[in-house]
Amino acid sequence: MIHSSMADESSGVADAPARVLIVLLGSIGDVVRALPLLGRLRQNWPRAYIAWAVEPKSEPILRGHPWLDETIIYDRSRAPRSFLTFLRHIRRGRFDLAIDLQRHLKSGIVALASGAPRRLGFARANVKEYNHWFSTEQIPPQPAMRLKLMQYQQFGDLLGLASGPIAFGLRGSPDADERIAELLQQAPRPILGVILGSSWASRLYFPEAIAEVVRSLSVADDRAPAFFPVLIGGPDDRALAAQVEHHLETLPRLNLTGKTRLDELPALFRACAAAFAPDCGPMHIAAAVGCPVVSLWGATAAQRSAPWGFADFAITGAIGCSPCYLRRCPVGRECMRRIDPASVAAAVRRAHMSRIARTEEDANARLSAVGGGR
């Protein structure tokens, strides 16, 4: 937990809710981007009990998180019976405050079922399925293309919470660190994270283009060393990984597709010098632990979903229909096809160099502080 005497003095701890429920059931990327709000709640209300309602696919991100007291899991594969059981669990929590970050009918019902007298949600202009009916207070209407992370921060503003640096608190576990270290034991450094998959087919980059980026980065130049590629994805990405490997031919690489768990990704991305990815949850995990990410955009918009801290390295395919927000593309992912692999490779090198520069600046700042203290 974050403990702060400043929070005790500035945020009216005596008036803080005793029990808080965050409702965000869905995607991995959304859960990651809501973690800074969780940190803000914990910093300002260090003694509050905070629970998070979530689905199994995203639960590993929250498992053992130091700022969270409980996860309440809804397994939709067993609906509708599981939903009623889930709601009873929510009701037993006796929450004082519910924060609905999902903005759908289901999340509104969950917030209402909590029995919390104060229920925060999005404004009517930003919700679906009459979600605003279930909240007692709403944040101001949000521009559609505003970063979702900053939209979530509006809930902290509505609550009058003191702000601070954006942080995610993804520490991982010693077991995850040990397993990733074992998997990467023979991998030369620096490592390039090649993030393959996405939950939407329309977002995927092409295997031959991915391979071309990897080939380019496997050769050192005057700006950066040669990178060793590690293919990263879930079990559903194995076919795409096989296609990429086909185009890579004999180029050395490590294929971890389907071999890592979600809760191991923070440790994996900490070991990567840089990464590139389509719009996906692992992209946000990489950015959250400080791995420089070059993100590739077409069907969705970087203005709304770029990984935190690395928006300058977002590349969008120039086409009139982008962003379309279609899960399946009717024109063969032309937006993604227009992303030049050479541009991606150049952006990865710039991202890597920016990390080196920041590391040097931090080291110099620490030395200055030590020197000034003598």
Image: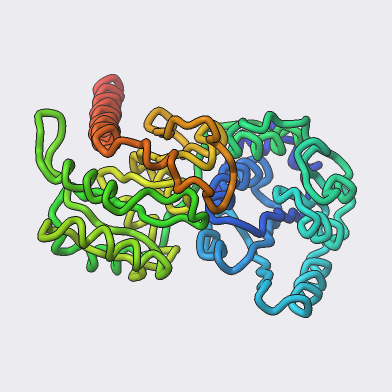
The image quadrant of residue 114 is bottom right
Protein image colouring: rainbow
State whether residue 359 appears in this view: no
Q: Which residue is situated farthest in the top direction here? A: 372
Q: Which residue is situated farthest in the front direction here? A: 331
Observer-nearest of 202 and 158: 202
Q: Position of residue 96 (x, y in %)?
A: 83, 53
Q: Position of residue 353 (x, y in %)?
A: 23, 31
Q: Position of residue 370 (x, y in %)?
A: 27, 27
For image coordinates 71% across by 31% down, the residue present is: 142
Up the image or down, 360 lies above or below 197; here it is above
Observer-nearest of 281 and 198: 198
State whether residue 95 appears in this view: yes
Observer-nearest of 175 and 209: 209
For image coordinates 88% across by 59% down, the residue present is: 115
Up the image or down, 56 lies above or below 44; here it is below
In the rendered view, does 64 fall on the left or right side of 49?
A: left
Q: Quadrant of the C terminus?
A: top left
In the rendered view, does 313 fall on the left or right side of 23?
A: left
Q: Position of residue 124 (x, y in %)?
A: 83, 38
| Count of numbered tags | 0
For image coordinates 47% across by 51% down, the residue present is: 280
The image quadrant of residue 87 is bottom right
In the rendered view, does 368 fall on the left or right side of 45?
A: left
For image coordinates 30% across by 62% down, the residue present is: 241
The image quadrant of residue 138 is top right
